Amino acid sequence: MKHWSENPLWRWLRNFLRPSKGAAINLGRRKVLTGAAIGLGGACLSRVHPQVSGRTFNPALIRPPGAVGEDEFLSRCIRCGECMKVCPTNAIQPTCLQAGVEGMWTPVLNMDVGYCEYECTLCGQVCPTGAIRKLSLEEKQKIKIGQSFVDKNRCLPYAFGRPCIVCEEHCPTPNKAIWVEEIEVMGPAGERILVQQPHVDPDLCVGCGICQNKCPIKDRSGIYVTSVGETRNDHNQMLL
């Protein structure tokens, strides 16, 4: 079997990139090839984000309430940062690669940093291009930007039988999207402990993220928000 280095195509490419001894070095040729490779790679990378296929969505790509559909959003957003400046809780942060290379520095909500204030519409008011629509407070409070999920392996009442209702207390929706169920659990010494285990109503949750932000578990919360169910995208839905 021939060694791969004896392949005619490989020999041609090697000679093209590395001229024989005594031949003048054609820097222009190398620059063209290098530029073409970089351009092709950049074009590919610019479209490498979870929403390209239309079937997979990045759970961390939580856009501000009033954001238009993702393709239109990327074409409208000019990365001015005005929405980030006015966010009262600093929840709106610049993306890194959550939306791919072409979406870098566009706004995304980071619930570990802040949360979407239920009584606030500032981001839509300052957006100069309509990437985030200007909404009335009533309209904004009906917008769903994501969905909360309880992590039963980390939530204190579930995982450790420790009393905690912080997420339910902070839930801002008029009819609480987070409700608790009183459960009797066994303590380490065999004692019976009454705890209130949280549940999330997907029909009421708007994904504001205050539950995640206020959870007393600091490294990774016992309740978290993903982008699923967002009002702006009929395809990124959990419930049929």
Image (cartoon, helix red, strand yellow):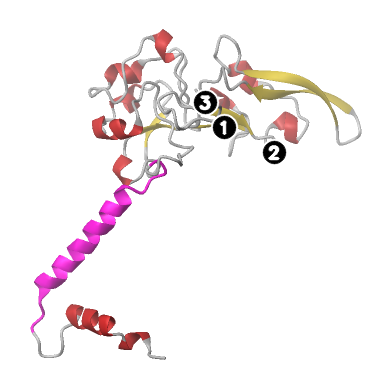
Q: Earlier in the sequence, mark 3 or mark 1?
A: 3
Residue type (three-letter) at the residue carrying disc 1 = Tyr
Q: Earlier in the sequence, mark 2 or mark 1?
A: 2
Element class at badge 1: strand
Q: Residue at x 44, y 28 (%)?
A: 234
Q: From the viewer's perspective, is 202 left or right of 137? A: right
Q: Which residue is mark 2?
A: 153
Q: From the viewer's perspective, is 22 left or right of 119? A: left
Q: What is the magenta range?
A: 24-51
Q: Is residue 1 above or below residue 138?
A: below
Residue type (three-letter) at the residue carrying disc 2 = Asn
Q: Residue furthest front?
A: 240
Position of residue 30 measured from the top left corner of the image (x, y, whole percent): 16, 71
Cα–Cα gap, marks 3 and 1: 7 Å
Q: Quadrant of residue 186?
A: top right
Q: Which residue is mark 1?
A: 224
Q: Nearer the viewer, residue 54 or 105?
A: 54
Which disc number belongs to residue 63?
none
Q: Based on the picture, tell me whether residue 44 belongs to the magenta stretch.
A: yes
Residue type (three-letter) at the residue carrying disc 3 = Gly
Q: Is residue 36 above or below residue 179?
A: below
Position of residue 219 measured from the top left corner of the image (x, y, whole percent): 58, 39
